[in-house]
Amino acid sequence: MKTMRRITALLILTVLLIGTVGLSGFAQETPFLRSYDVQSYVCVAGKLEAADAGYTANMMLVESNADLNSLTSDDIGYIGQSVIEPDGSYRFEFTFSDFTYNTDNQVNNYQVILNIAGEKMTETITKASVISELVQFDLDTPQFGSAVAQIENQYALQGLRYTMLIGFYTEGYKLLGITRADKVTGDDGAFTYQYGDIPQGTVRAKAFLWESYERSIPLADTKEIDVLGYTTNRSAMCLTIAPGLDETQRNFAWYDLPGIDGARIQYAVKTSEADLITFPEENAITAAGTCGAVDVTEYNGLALGEGKEDSIFKHEGDYSWAKATITDLEYGKTYVYRVGDQLGWCQGIYEFKTDATPEDGFRFILFSDEHCTNGSAAAPLVSALTKAVNTCEEPSFIFTMGDIMDLPWIESYYTSYFSRPALKSIPLAAVPGTTHDMLWSPREASLFGHHFNMPNQSKTSGYTKNLGGNYWYTYGDVLFIGIMHNGTGAAAIAETKAFIEQTVAENQDTKWRVLCSHFPFGYGLNTVNNYFPGGSDFIADNGIDIVFNGHLHQYFRTYQMYGGQPVNTDITNTVTDPEGTVYVSLNTTGFRAGSTGRDPSYMAVVGSNAVRYYSTLSEIEGYYTTHFSIASVKTTDTENSFTLTTYQNVCDRTTGAITDTKILDTYTITKSCQP
């Protein structure tokens, strides 16, 4: 039996463990998966326990007559891996070209073996089922559209080449942007693209030859597909929840069909699990929202005008954006909500919780540099999100320091990011990344402003149409300030200073003040005086306790700083009533590796003398690291503290599955309680 894929050391270990443990006790007669075949495309999906979330599911295909109790690596036709989702679900997608087939192109019957890897390797859970005879395919017809079919919110297309881009359109407008077929090799590759629910109608798939980000050539060959079984109901796309003005409010943003009007949201206190099935409309409050056309008219300085109607970057008119705010939320409640427009309510009922006593303290998660894409490249982010939420235990919100998307104009990256169920329940605050969310220019962040609904946005400070403006909100006794675009020019610096001063002046009663931006305000590659002249004194004089940033793909924190110098050079994890401000650079949460080209001694002398908790690329071959931090704030009558704990995940480079997590750094600031 000829094996076409290399089997990594980890997967060989999996096979050896299966051979050692055996498969006694598994129920082959009980189906545990669903499989579909469309020409060369096969999908295997199923659901385990929620407790398995974050682990890696390994799928192995072996001949239907193989002895499952004595497998060796030679018996394996294909191995796939999937990170188990928070609800326990998993999905494998593959093509015949991924695994063994015989010379006449007829694939034999295979049985599928599943086991859970990672920390659960010693308690291997293994089940099996047989995929009935897979369909024969023809390697000699590799043109686009030779096989297209709809499978559960997906399209499968055979015959894609590596350099192709696929755009999906419906009813005359593009459905969800483009996807690059970068996971297939050779002329026989198949490819799938997942999308949100749409009305019944006809979908047209169109291919482009990839040349560059600015230009791709449309191919004449297209394929129309009838979408069956859908009603006029549809799900809101890219639905996300964000903090509101304070802990009694929440903001929402989503995508809807083009030309809609009357965006709205409805919410009610949850009384039972049945409210997630049938919305309790009789007890609900409806709030009006705002909406408009997604208007993207320029990328990389290239106007999208006449003659570029087929440009893969043309999003104008493809969707509508919608935003809404709900207010007067009660403490310690669980709410259900749904969104809609003049056509009715979108499918999907979601829930979120409010803190019981936010004035006494709360916890939140910090991310940075997720660099989200779609497909398997998003796996590290999925693992990190699951791990962070489980570790934090009911976080009040998540704050990300930017470079959220790997490229700012690809809508499917946003779709991938917001598809995580947790982001429909946990508020997400964000500042845009200077390099990837807007390519160094706010006008390039054309999609960011449509997808995020931040509170209290300034119409003057840091404002651009595509981003919104600098913003702030309070949660409990903490003031959070988000800087949307910390430019380096004199006018931008003056604008930012004025915004910070005014915001602090309006929130003098807060006990803690946190400043967030993507690009560093100082310390690291750019000293505070080079980037933000007089900024160190200015930030400390305005009572900013802690400054978070991303961008550097390194984790470090400084001493308490004032005037560009450490207030005290004692290395400690706790300080009480300190002077100055601490600066924290967060490492990447996504698939991008940490920086390895910077000498830590350089970081220690460039205006910072940083406490060097550097977290970079793992030296273990085949693994890399992702990171998240958890902040715990306590503001009671007897305790007033801010504790930051930063975690490092060791992840499998192929699957993104977390194999180990450790605490990288802890730091606690304590202030004396005021009488």
Image: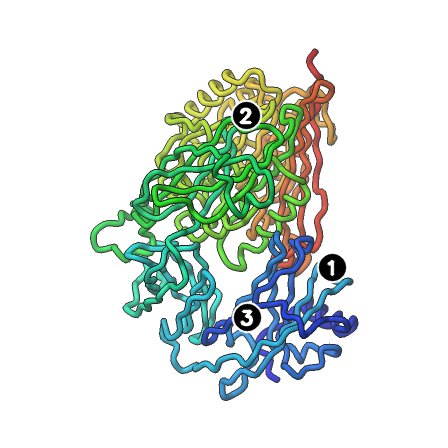
User: Which three-letter amino acid code belongs to the residue tagged 3?
Assistant: Ser
Q: Quadrant of residue 195?
A: bottom left
CA separation, marks 2 and 3? Answer: 48 Å
Looking at the image, is mark 2 or mark 1 earlier in the sequence? 1
User: Which three-letter amino acid code belongs to the residue tagged 2?
Assistant: Thr
- State the residue at coordinates (65%, 30%): 362
Determine the residue located farthest toward the top in the rendered image: 675
Q: Disc 2 vs disc 3: which is toward the camera?
A: 3
* In front of the other: 71 or 401: 71
Circles 3 and 1: CB atoms closer than 8 Å: no
What label does residue 120 carry, if any? 1
Q: Give the class, few, some or many, for how many residues have Cα within 10 Å of label 3's Cα (few <14, many ≥20).
A: some
Looking at the image, is mark 2 or mark 3 earlier in the sequence? 3
Residue bearing mark 3: 35
Residue 644 placed where, x, y %?
67, 34
- State the residue at coordinates (69%, 53%): 51
What label does residue 474 carry, if any? 2
Q: Give the class, few, some or many, for how many residues have Cα within 10 Å of label 2's Cα (few <14, many ≥20).
A: many
Quadrant position of the N terminus in the picture? bottom right
Residue 558 placed where, x, y %?
64, 32
* In front of the other: 171 or 389: 171
Vertical order, 15 against 628 (above or below): below
Residue 451 shows up from this direction:
yes
Quadrant position of the C terminus in the picture? top right
What label does residue 61 carry, if any? none
